[in-house]
Image: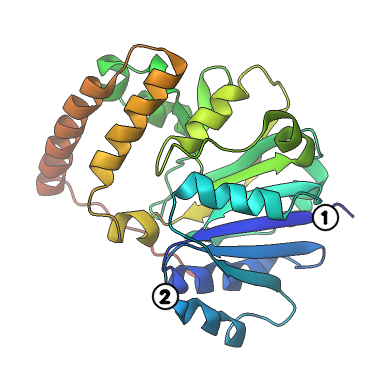
Amino acid sequence: MKTVGITIVSHNSYEDLLFFFNSFMKYNSPTGVKFLIVETSKNNRIDDLEEHVDSEVNFQIVYIPNNGYAYACNYGLSHFGDCDILILSNADIVFTSEVMKSIRKSFNQNNYGSIIQKNGNGRTVTFDLYPQFKSLFTELFKVHRLLNKFQWYNQRYVYIVGAFMIFGRNIIEKNGLFDENFFLYCEETDYYYRLRNNNNALIIKDRYIIHTISSSIGKKFSDKGQLLESSLRYYYNKHKCAPYVEYWKVSIKITVAYAWITNIFFKKDKKNICL
């Protein structure tokens, strides 16, 4: 059986972690799976998980300095260097079906990719264009939504959103770790861009997970706009490509205006996540 090491990056995400493990155990067997919770806050409430997580789950908790998402990912990748398959996951992931058998069947030490990710409203949020291929046109017409709707993935132009990343061991050994100059955002974009000429990418499309996009970023980082802009500028400098940061600023304003108008004239029924 292929061994799997799952690193869960958490920043004071106790409730998310409970949902993560409860949903995982509802559909999956923990046999051959090791979990490492990399906690970047100083809140030791995470220690209480041992009282609420199924005793069959093999997990450890480590507290590390909050030196960024890439730093936490690298800690986990190094920790599980002897596993066949390495998974990097956000804490705010909810499982909706069996996935571990599918991952073991589809992936080997030379593959990388993900499983389809959806948000709480059921919309696919797995793919996005590399920033250097974006423009005001692609942003205003929401090309990334079309990519997700039709589940179109080509590693030369599109990267996988980093909420649930799957890597074979040889991929990490050959390509190295994440660039820790990215504190938050774009770290997965940069890594997948380094893999753009590798044709061993896989996407499991007959299963999906829910990325609730809840706490670790949305609720706890008030300066996420500045962090994203900083990461984008570093990404462009690193890869020597023309920036679309100004396009991004304009598109954000238009998106906010569009959402405001839509909320006034149209009411959308939101789906609740049920375990």
Residue position for label 2: 43
Q: Which residue is mark 1?
A: 3
Seen from the viewer's position, the closer of residues 125 and 169 is: 169
Residue at (53, 61) in percent of width and height: 94
Secondary element at image label 2: loop
Task: Say which element carries label 1.
Answer: loop
| Residue 36 against residue 80 in the figure, above or below | below
12 vs 173, left or right, is left
Mark yes or no: residue 26 visible. Answer: no
Which residue is at the front of the view, 218 or 232? Answer: 232
The residue positioned 23% from the left and 48% from the top of the image is: 223
Mark 1, other Cα within 10 Å: few <14 / some 14–19 / many ≥20: some
Q: Are marks 1 and 2 in contact (CB under 8 Å)?
A: no
The three-letter code of the residue at mark 1 reads Thr
Q: Residue furthest right?
A: 1
Amino acid under disc 2: Asn
